[in-house]
Each structure stands twice: as structure tokens, then as C-alpha cells.
């Protein structure tokens, strides 16, 4: 019996035995998440000690060298921060400007399943505004990455967001979560918003958002969206493939299953659920700009050593969010890679939902807006625009396409260009179609 998981080891042995009998393979690769978690647990006292020592440095005697204190503080700060968190950060949106006045904002869970919550940013003393579902990607970070997007949308809309839960905290008994389940969640969430809601999908979920709209239109669902806005989404990745698209097609789907899928560690509520671990995704993100991240941490150490608190706080705030990682359900990840990036089922009219074909021609009596970034190296120009060709039932006067000059992937939905150039177009589009 191992000291880190107690009697749970017998459960693990049973699962592994069952897997072998069913022809599954449980090699060392499938257990590296457990090894990583064990390492994090074993080194936790060192980080806690560094954090405690950092607090005592604030009480250092006046005669002590500021240079020594600064350098020691920098070293302890970096040690205490050498970890990841699997808890969702706070949105931190307490108020927003509506017109010329500041309005309080509070979070309410309007609806929830084991895999996600429909989070409502309720505003007090505001008249009726268009109800909007912001569909956050399930891509290794939490929906809080869109807090800036949310804050902008809140000025003129009644905003809800898909607040996805971390699979490592969801028991295996709750079942699987695949691409069909994601789409089903969007349909259910829209149903909670009432008639004629508006849906805005950011990046990855654009395929599921379009599928949900098609299903709801074909079934004449009372909560089918009044508008659908797709922002930097991979509707058809055959168009000007990016490095990300090429990588997805460079290996068979079995390679992704064998090398990237792992079991949630025994210490977690979702023990032995199959996931694409968040820390593996983060490693890939960091490796793409490794020199930049190293420089940022060196800058952080220098700012702390020199007592430049505001500059240090800016870097710490960014990495607090960046190092908050979320696992992906294995089924969802594998089906997304296969159906969206390898087989391109939606643009070929072959995508199925619960065994029935998704008919994009059924999308009608609603507005369709697509937004792309000129310098997007994740979802290139034309991949999102493809939705306009698929949705033949949408009237010409209800279509809008915007290609934003000078922005990359994240600039489509965050930053100055989003606030000053893209958002006004989206706001007017929603208003006209409400």
C-alpha cells in the first residue's frame, strides 16, 4: 500500500487488471500525470516554506542591506511560485460602466451540470438588455481568460458564460464528456436564457456553436439564437492550414491517444478519469515562446530585487492566470482532433450529433457574424469565414464578416482593437438583430 494514496492502490490495480483483460495498454506513459502530481505534493513543503520566509522578510531589521533583502525576496518568490494551480481564478468583475454610471455586478450560477456551469453576471438597476451566451473554449485554461471580453460585453448585454469545470475534479461515475456532450450543453444553456438569445463563440467551440444553432433551427427550438457570432474559430481548417492544423494531421489519431491521454491522479476526485492533462498543454504553450517566458521570470526577479512592486505585480498577475491549468476530457479532445482538424466533418456535411446529421443549411431566421484576425497564426484567414458558405439559409442582409487588420488570435477578442474596433461592430450587429 502506497503512502500517497492508501487503500486506493487496490482500486488502481483493479482498473489496470480490467484494462489488460480488455486489451487496453497501461504503460508508463499513461501514468506520468500521477508521477507529476506526486512530485508536486512532495515539493509543496519547500514552496510553503519559501512563502512563509518571504513574509518574515518584511519584518527584516532596518540595518539589513536592502540589496540582500531584495535578492533573497526574489529567490523566495520564484521558489514559492514554481507550481501550477488547478483551481479556477476569480473573474474579479465587481462593477462595470453602463452608459455614464458604474453598475455593480455579481455572479450567479443559473444552471449547472457536473461538467460546467452557466454563470450569469447579473447587474443591478439596469433595464432589459440582449441576453448573450459567451461560449468559452475548453482548451487547457479556465473561462476566466475571457474576463476582459466579458467586461466589455457587459456594457450593453446581459452576459452568461460557459464556465467549464476541471475534469480532474469530476468523478468517473459522472460518465464521459465528448463533442456531442459539449454541443448538448450549449443547447441546454441557451434554453435557460429564454427566447431569442445571442451566442458568441470564441475560437475552438465555434464548431459546436454552429452545430447547436443548426440543430435548434432545424427543430424550431424556442430558444434558438437570434444571432451567432463566431470569432477566430476552426470551421474549416483545410483553408490556409496553420502549423497547429498541420500538426494535427501529421499523426494518426492513435498517436494522440497513446501519447497525450493520461489518468487523473489518485489524489483527485476525478481519479482515473482519462484526460489530456493541463500541465502537458501548458508545457506545449510555454515551449512555443520559451525565451520570452524565461525573460519574464528574470525580469520578475529583478523587479522584486529592486523593490519595483508595480512592475512585479503586472508579471505575477499574468502568470497567476497562465499557470492556472485545466485538464480536457479525453473523449472531447480526441473527438475534436479527429472530427474538426483531421476529418473536417462539419464543412463536408458529415458531422453527426447523437447519430443524426448536422444540417448547417437549416440555420435561418438569425444573424450570422464571423470575425477573423489578419495575423492569426492559430486560426488563419478564411477558416471562420467558411461558416458563411455553409449557412445558405441565412439572408444576405443578416450576414456580417469582419477581418481585423493588425491583430493575431487573441487580439480578435481582447485588447484595444477588440474594445475599440471589433466590439462596436458586434454590439450594433446584435442590436439590429434583437
Image: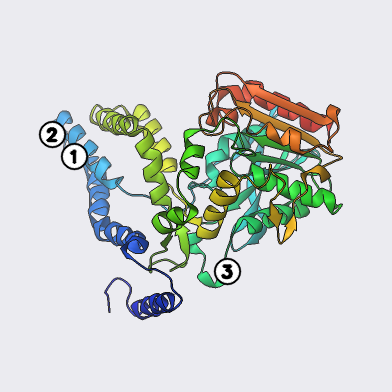
Describe the element under mark 3 as helix, strand or loop: loop
Query: Which residue in the protein does label 3 denote?
Result: 175
Residue 243 shows up from this direction: yes
Q: Is residue 228 left or right of residue 181?
A: right
Residue 274: x %, y % from top left: 47, 63
Residue 279: x %, y % from top left: 39, 50
Query: Which residue in the protein does label 1 denote?
Result: 60
Query: Which residue in the protein does label 2 denote?
Result: 64
Identify which residue, 106 or 157, lies in the foreground: 157
Q: Is residue 343 left or right of residue 263?
A: right
Identify which residue, 49 or 114, lies in the foreground: 114
Q: Does the residue at mark 3 contact the one at mark 1 (Cβ under 8 Å)?
A: no
Marks 3 and 2 sit apart, C-alpha to C-alpha, by 58 Å
Residue 243: x %, y % from top left: 47, 34
Of callouts 3 and 2, the N-terminal one? 2
Of callouts 3 and 1, the N-terminal one? 1
Q: Is residue 355 left or right of residue 284?
A: right
Q: Does the residue at mark 1 contact the one at mark 2 (Cβ under 8 Å)?
A: yes
In front: label 3 or label 1: 3
Residue 156 shows up from this direction: no
Determine whether 291 is above or below 128 in the image.
above
Describe the element under mark 1 as helix, strand or loop: loop
The 10 Å Cα crowd at callout 1, few under 14, some 14 to 19, many 20 or more, is few
Describe the element under mark 2 as helix, strand or loop: loop
The 10 Å Cα crowd at callout 3, few under 14, some 14 to 19, many 20 or more, is few
Q: Residue at x 45, y 47 (%)?
A: 251
In front: label 3 or label 2: 3
Picture quadrant where residue 432 is located: top right
Total numbered labels placed on residues in the image: 3
The 10 Å Cα crowd at callout 2, few under 14, some 14 to 19, many 20 or more, is few
Amino acid at each position: 500500500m502506497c503512502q500517497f494514496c492508501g487503500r486506493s492502490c487496490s482500486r488502481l490495480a483493479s482498473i489496470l487488471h480490467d484494462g489488460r483483460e480488455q486489451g487496453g495498454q497501461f504503460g508508463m506513459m499513461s501514468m506520468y500525470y500521477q508521477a507529476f502530481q506526486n512530485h508536486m505534493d512532495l515539493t509543496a513543503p519547500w514552496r510553503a516554506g519559501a512563502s512563509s520566509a518571504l513574509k518574515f522578510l518584511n519584518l527584516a531589521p532596518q540595518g539589513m542591506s536592502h540589496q540582500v533583502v531584495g535578492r533573497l525576496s526574489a529567490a523566495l518568490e520564484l521558489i514559492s511560485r514554481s507550481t501550477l494551480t488547478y483551481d479556477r481564478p476569480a473573474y474579479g468583475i465587481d462593477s462595470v460602466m453602463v452608459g455614464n454610471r458604474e453598475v455593480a455586478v455579481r455572479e450567479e450560477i443559473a444552471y449547472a451540470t457536473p461538467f460546467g456551469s452557466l454563470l450569469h453576471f447579473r447587474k443591478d438597476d439596469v433595464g432589459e438588455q440582449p441576453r448573450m451566451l459567451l461560449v468559452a473554449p475548453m482548451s487547457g485554461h479556465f473561462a476566466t481568460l475571457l474576463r476582459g471580453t466579458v467586461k466589455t460585453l457587459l456594457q450593453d448585454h446581459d452576459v452568461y458564460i460557459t464556465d467549464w469545470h476541471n475534469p480532474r475534479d469530476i468523478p468517473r461515475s459522472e460518465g464521459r464528456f465528448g463533442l456531442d456532450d459539449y454541443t448538448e450543453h450549449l443547447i441546454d444553456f441557451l434554453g435557460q436564457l429564454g427566447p431569442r438569445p445571442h451566442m458568441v463563440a470564441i475560437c475552438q467551440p465555434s464548431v459546436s456553436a454552429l452545430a447547436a444553432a443548426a440543430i435548434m433551427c432545424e427543430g424550431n427550438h424556442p430558444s434558438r439564437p437570434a444571432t451567432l457570432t463566431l470569432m477566430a474559430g476552426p470551421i474549416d481548417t483545410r483553408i490556409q492550414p496553420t502549423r497547429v492544423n498541420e500538426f494535427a494531421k501529421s499523426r494518426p489519431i492513435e498517436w494522440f491517444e497513446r501519447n497525450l491521454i493520461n489518468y487523473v491522479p489518485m489524489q483527485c476526485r476525478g481519479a482515473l478519469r482519462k484526460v489530456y492533462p493541463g500541465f502537458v498543454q501548458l508545457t506545449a504553450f510555454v515551449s512555443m515562446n520559451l525565451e520570452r517566458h524565461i525573460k519574464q521570470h528574470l525580469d520578475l526577479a529583478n523587479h522584486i530585487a529592486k523593490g519595483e512592486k508595480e512592475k512585479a505585480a503586472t508579471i505575477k498577475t499574468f502568470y497567476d492566470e497562465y499557470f492556472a491549468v485545466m485538464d480536457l476530457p479525453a473523449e472531447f479532445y480526441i473527438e475534436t482532433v479527429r472530427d474538426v482538424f483531421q476529418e473536417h466533418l462539419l464543412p463536408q456535411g458529415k458531422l453527426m450529433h447523437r447519430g443524426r446529421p448536422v444540417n448547417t443549411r437549416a440555420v435561418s431566421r438569425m444573424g450570422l457574424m464571423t470575425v477573423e484576425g489578419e495575423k492569426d497564426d492559430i486560426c488563419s484567414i478564411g477558416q471562420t469565414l467558411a461558416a458563411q458558405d455553409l449557412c445558405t439559409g441565412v439572408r444576405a442582409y443578416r450576414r456580417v464578416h469582419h477581418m481585423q487588420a493588425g491583430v493575431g488570435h487573441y487580439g480578435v477578442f481582447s485588447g484595444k482593437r477588440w474594445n475599440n474596433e471589433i466590439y462596436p461592430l458586434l454590439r450594433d450587429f446584435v442590436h439590429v438583430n434583437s
